[in-house]
Amino acid sequence: MIIPTLSLAAAADQEQEQLLTRLATFAPAIKLSVAQPADLLAPYVPMSAIARAWVSLATAADSSPEAVLALLDAGVDKAIVPFSTPDNVTALLRSIPAPDRLLVQFQDWLQVNPATLAALAGLVSGIVLPWTDNISAEQVGQVLALVRTQDKRNLLVLDSQATTPAQLATLVPLAHLGATVTVSAAAITFPSTTTSSTSSSSTSEEGIPASTLLTSLLTSDRPDGLFPTIVTDTHATPLGLVYSSAASLAEALRTGTGVYYSRSRSGLWYKGATSGATQQLVRIDADCDTDALRFIVHQHPPGFCHRDTHTCFGTGAAPGGIAGLARTLQARKVSAPEGSYTSRLFIDKDLLDAKLLEEAQELVDAGSASEVAQEAADVIYFVLAKATKAGVSLADIEAVLDARARKVTRRKGDAKPQYAAAIAAKRRTSSTTNGDAPAHAAPAAVPEVGLKMKHVDLATTPSDSPAYAALLQRPILNADKITKIVQPIIQAVREKGDAALVELTKKFDRVDLAGTSPVLLPPFAQHYNPSDLRADVRAAIDTAISNVETFHRAQLAEADLQVETMPGITCSRIVRPIERVGLYVPGGSAVLPSSTLMLGVPARVAGCSTIVIATPPRADGSVAPEVLYVADKVGAAQVVRAGGAQAVAAMAYGTESVLKVDKICGPGNQFVTAAKLVCATDTNAMVAIDMPAGPSEVLVIADADADPRYVAADLLSQAEHGPDSQVVLVAVNMSDAQVGAVEDQVRKQAELLPRVDIVKQCLPKSWVVRAPTLDAAIDFSNAYAPEHLILNLPDATALAVVDKITNAGSVFVGAYSPESCGDYASGTNHTLPTYGYARMYSGVNTGTFVKHITTQYLTKDGLEGLAQCVMTLAEVEGLDAHARAVAIRVGKFNV
Ligand SMILES: NC(=O)c1ccc[n+]([C@@H]2O[C@H](COP(=O)([O-])OP(=O)(O)OC[C@H]3O[C@@H](n4cnc5c(N)ncnc54)[C@H](O)[C@@H]3O)[C@@H](O)[C@H]2O)c1
Ligand SMILES: N[C@H](CO)Cc1c[nH]c[nH+]1
């Protein structure tokens, strides 16, 4: 080994700090001399240098055992204690139980003899000797052999303080022998290379080039003289295999970036120079037989590989886990989506600190292994959020952990009295109760984020208890509050029309439509580039439209009816389409061509003459081609580029460019639903609505036969819709382990979802409901009235259960009927009543877009047969004119 040596200045010194940081990128160790051991703690000594420091106390004022321990506890790799007498030094060394972290420094070669070294055996890991050029290689070999008698890894450090390449050249053979030699750190230079060949770099500056230190002990086993180089990130993930030359190493060390030798271009390769995917050099290491290298780098996006992936190996995905979370948080700190939970945490310090305390408490309370894993994950999330917010990286935390691992003295680690007392009190309480929640307790307070659902057991929650009633509630915001928010929006659209639409779209969707009409007109294909709509997407939409149309056209068959109620009296009901309908297609957090077709197809099948579609525009003001494609398919008259309450108001009242409609249909968030309800009750608007279809929800009834993977996937398919969605698992007679298996799957699958942040806000508002019997599960589901009900039960059981379902928007029967099929393409409609409105509303169907008109035809005989009945009832009500309209026809009234 060749290592730099430096006397550490006691006072802050920026130059030394920079030098130490650079040395730490390639030197296997750095020998430091200090005046005071405490100097090492000077803030300018970077952690990367401390971890590699061999600190000599030979010139220090204090070399007591306490001073040595302080150094080792500060994280230095080795402490070098001065030799005085064998007795003194062995006494000191014995008091420090870390032989592999200690070296002894002799002033003179004459002090080194077999007896002295034998006395040090087992107490140190080597010795340091001054070196001058009158010491022969033979002498070095002899001492080395002695030093290694006890342990062949023991070190002989020759302290040369060399400052020139010539001096270095005389030391290299000694290093080849196995000695560690030092050169003066002050003499190390980082010159630029003047060649791009594979040969050694030529330099114009004085001193010892850093790359020479690195390469002088390397031996390539390749004909081209290159060194195979593995590149990894700071979490040891291999990014790729490249090659280094002496010149590329010089450039890497000079620039502190990833620079390699490109065999294809026969020259230096400054990684990222053209792609922008640059690398910050963290460290270069040689392998054990000095013919290959490892570069540890901070890889900047999009990644190392030419495929724009993090690594060239495997799928190229960056590692997940804690490192992945740290990376995500870092990215969120730079550009967190506004309104996302993580950005709230970064802004709201109190929230973050409160969550940290809350999650730590929940981890303390966690019982089962699965609970501990969940809670530990929550704690880690908030810890990393706190660190990221403070500008502390995972690597910084790991460096502290590594430094602590190097501590020699151990703290007792007792808890502070107030915490110890709190835990003791908790233990006492739990040992005096059976630990069960009281049967009538309200559902427990829950965290707002995480991948854990709340739990409740119907066996201990009677159906007439407040806790049971609470379970039927949805996580909706205060309806009055939302109504107060949407009222002025509606008013603004009524008063200012298009101008308000443009203004509110800018405010809520951050899209500037100024200077353009908020309305797109057909053919809608003119508003997108055909190549932006993939052929497979077009085909999938066509299949979905075909199935939805088949099912909804079949619903027309029962439309007209005609009945003879008495001889000569024929009553009919005829169906007429609602002429002008407005379809709201949500778009705040997802593009929903499926909602467009679920609304547009029945409207077209019903025969509505004017179909207006409204949806929030994308950031550039455009509407997704998939939505426009469906708009053409269903023959829409307009696509309004607006969302939320303003879009609903525009369709309800009309504006200069938006057509007024007779009925507004479609789902949306709480603002959309509230606006629909407000408009429907305003007679000035004269508009109807389909139903309150708000945030998506699913209830899965599953038993022990259900595959936990399927159950979890179904729950997540709705949890990803929005933070206000709710998912419920009703677990029929499942064991703890079976419920745990579903929860494990939920967690695992959720972590893989791009919308995991949304899922994390939904799951803590969701429930695992343990049901002792299938009947209890069905009763609960009927009371909850879910938008979607999945019966993940054996087929025959599931089919029989359908007969007992009294309230649900849509039912998915058996293990192979995931809700996703109904969401997109099987044929049923996905616009369904939520919030429990499935008790009294149907989902969207062909009937949603029609109204019924009744007719009657009475013959003269028919009227005579009914006349007395009508006249009697009219008389009872005192409505004589009613009675006479009949009497005058049957000859019982004349004027
Ligand atoms: N029940 C169903 O059939 C069904 C189907 C699909 C989607 N959904 C639900 O639709 C919803 C879609 O919600 P979304 O937000 O993604 O899209 P969205 O289109 O319903 O709402 C987006 C609009 O909300 C308005 N808005 C946002 N924040 C506001 C604020 N603070 N004040 C006033 N207005 C505000 C904006 O105008 C924005 O354009 C989800 O809850 C999803 O679960 C339901
Ligand atoms: N699940 C939603 C109805 O609640 C509909 C939907 C749209 N896209 C996917 N799913």
Image: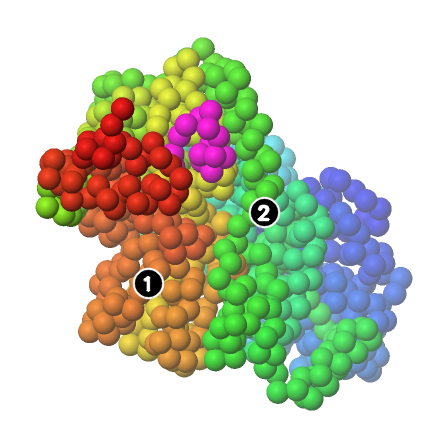
Q: Secondary structure at mark 1?
A: loop
Residue at the disc numbered 2: 478
Residue 374, label in figure? none
| Amino acid type of the residue that numbered disc 2 sits on in the rendered structure | Asn
Q: Secondary structure at mark 2?
A: loop
- The mark nearer the N terminus, 1 or 2, is 2
Please state if 135 lies on the left or on the right of 58 as rendered. left
Q: Quadrant of the N terminus?
A: bottom right
Q: Is residue 686 magenta?
A: yes
- Is residue 330 visible from the viewing direction of this image? no
* Residue 461 pos. (x, y %): 52, 75
* Residue 391 pos. (x, y %): 66, 45
Residue shown at 26% from the left, 60% from the top: 812
Could you say which quadrant of the image residue 208 lies in?
top right
Could you say which quadrant of the image residue 31 lies in?
bottom right
Q: Quadrant of ligand 1?
A: top left
Could you say which quadrant of the image residue 433 lies in?
bottom right
Residue shown at 31% from the left, 65% from the top: 805
Measure the alpha-carbon separation of dots 1 and 2: 28 Å
| Amino acid type of the residue that numbered disc 1 sits on in the rendered structure | Thr
- Type of colouring: rainbow
- Is residue 657 visible from the viewing direction of this image? yes
Question: Residue reaching furthest right?
Answer: 61
In the depicted structure, whether residue 844 falls above or below residue 202: below
Residue at the disc numbered 1: 806
Q: Which of these two is toward me, 299 or 694?
A: 694
Question: Which residues make up the magenta segment?
Answer: 675-689
Residue shown at 71% from the left, 80% from the top: 426
Please state if 93 lies on the left or on the right of 740 as rendered. right
Q: Which of these two is toward me, 514 or 645?
A: 645
* Residue 290 pos. (x, y %): 45, 58
Q: Is mark 2 within 8 Å of ligand 1?
A: no
